[in-house]
Image (cartoon, helix red, strand yellow):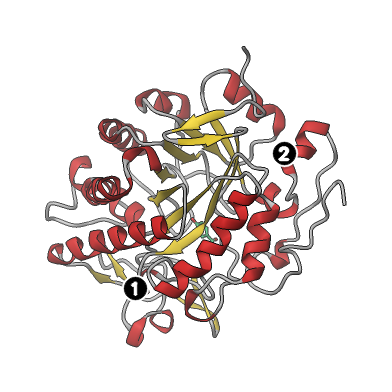
């Protein structure tokens, strides 16, 4: 039987009716206290024909926030808000996992409790500007986490995972991509530590592996995915030897027998790639299910599945503008164009008002 985007599959214990994955997309439309709103439920419910929805990146603690109006997954009110979303998606026959996020240095004191400094592996101010409630402002130099604080970060992932299960999610995805905290530890452009969490591949991967182990203990490996972005320069990221580093990380994740590995195969926001990278070679290192992401269309998605490179394909921007992307690809129908002006924040405009093929 030939496999394509429309054939069912299983990622760990999560059964997908097709191989379309809605990529995690930051939309900045949560309510007060990081509580998901009915409008957010409508947005996700509209996209439940995807085989799997991965939620927008969701902070695991008050210190994990780095942008305005993000939903959280650490208070009872947030759990109750998310429960309405998982119920709505499940009622439509969809599956949904939550992406667990700590932004690390990609934040600003105005977004953190008591004006705290953002935390990071090392005191390196990223180039670029933070999105705050007061607009764009320069990033600040973060505070380097002491090794003694890392158990507390792992505990925050555990609490968020328990909260996610209470909210009815089918699983969790550990966000270790795109220049946020776990990626900041992985890549040596942002990690200059001289303790057990810096230097060698083993040391730089230590926090990710500790977090993964702890999350797996709570949720079960068959409900846990990890997302990586080996050559994404976004958030001022680079590494001196990404192929060897990420091959090592894939090897080190194998023993967990995760539900999936999810890989951003390039640079997001049109940023190009930091270095050449052989994604096929990297993929050979990971022995479990693989979700490929970035700039796939229908043809390349089907080809990646048929060749065995990927088990499923994550589509981002196409799912913003096309809640019925599965049906549109099936019918070879034209796609709605996404309006980048309404990606981050705002109302239902550019969020839940993109037209379906069939009214
Ligand atoms: C973004 O807000 O641009 C963003 C957020 C999370 C990501 C990537 C990009 O993982």
The residue singled out by tag 1 in the image is: 63
- Is residue 116 or residue 290 the one in the foreground? 290
Real-space Cα separation, disc 2 to disc 1, in angstroms: 37 Å
Residue 71: tell me if it is visible. no
Residue topped by disc 2: 326
Relative image position of residue 295 (x, y in whole percent): 63, 40
**Could you tell which of marks 2 and 1 lies nearer the N-terminus?**
1
Relative placement, left or right, of 318 versus 36 is right
- Looking at the image, residue 252 sits to the left or right of residue 25; the answer is left
Is residue 216 visible to us here? yes
Q: Is mark 1 within 8 Å of ligand 1?
A: no
- Residue sticking out furthest to the right: 359
Q: Is residue 174 above or below residue 82?
A: above
Which residue is at a point 35% across and 83% down the rendered structure image? 113
**Nearer to the camera, 119 or 91:** 91
- Total marks in image: 2
For the point 46% across and 55% down, the residue is 168
Q: Is residue 156 left or right of residue 198?
A: right
The residue located at (76%, 35%) in the rendering is 329
* Ligand 1 is within 8 Å of the C-beta of the residue at disc 2: no
Tell me what residue is drawn at x 71 percent, y 63 percent: 351
């Amino acid at each position: 039987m030939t496999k394509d985007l429309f054939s069912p599959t299983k990622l760990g214990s999560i059964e997908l009716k097709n191989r379309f994955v809605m990529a995690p997309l930051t939309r900045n439309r949560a309510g007060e206290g990081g509580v998901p709103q009915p409008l957010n439920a409508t947005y996700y419910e509209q996209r439940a024909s995807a085989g799997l929805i991965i939620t927008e990146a969701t902070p695991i603690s008050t210190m994990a926030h780095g942008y305005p109006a993000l939903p959280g997954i650490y208070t009872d009110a947030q759990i109750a808000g998310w429960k309405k979303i998982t119920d709505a998606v499940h009622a439509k026959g969809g599956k949904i996992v939550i992406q667990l996020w700590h932004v690390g240095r990609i934040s600003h004191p105005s977004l953190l409790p008591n004006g705290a400094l953002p935390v990071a592996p090392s005191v390196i101010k990223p180039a670029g500007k933070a999105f705050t409630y007061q607009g764009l402002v320069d990033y600040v130099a973060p505070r380097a986490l002491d090794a003694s604080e890392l158990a507390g970060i792992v505990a925050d992932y555990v609490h968020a995972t328990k909260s996610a299960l209470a909210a009815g999610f089918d699983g969790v995805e550990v966000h270790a991509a795109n220049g946020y905290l776990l990626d900041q530890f992985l890549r040596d452009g942002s990690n200059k530590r001289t303790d057990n969490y810096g230097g060698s591949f083993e040391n730089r991967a230590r926090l990710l592996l500790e977090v993964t182990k702890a999350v797996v203990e709570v949720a079960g490996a068959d409900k846990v995915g990890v997302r990586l972005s080996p050559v994404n320069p976004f958030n001022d990221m680079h590494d001196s030897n990404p192929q060897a580093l990420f091959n090592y990380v894939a090897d080190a994740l194998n023993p967990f027998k995760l539900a999936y590995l999810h890989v951003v195969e390039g640079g997001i926001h049109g940023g190009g790639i930091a270095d050449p990278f052989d994604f096929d070679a990297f993929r050979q290192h990971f022995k479990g299910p693989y979700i490929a992401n970035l700039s796939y269309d229908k043809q390349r998605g089907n080809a990646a599945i048929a060749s065995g490179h990927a088990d499923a394909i994550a589509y981002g921007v196409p799912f913003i503008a096309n809640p019925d992307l599965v049906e549109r690809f099936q019918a070879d129908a034209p796609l709605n164009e996404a309006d980048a002006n309404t990606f981050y924040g705002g109302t239902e405009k550019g969020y839940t008002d993109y037209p379906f093929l069939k009214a």
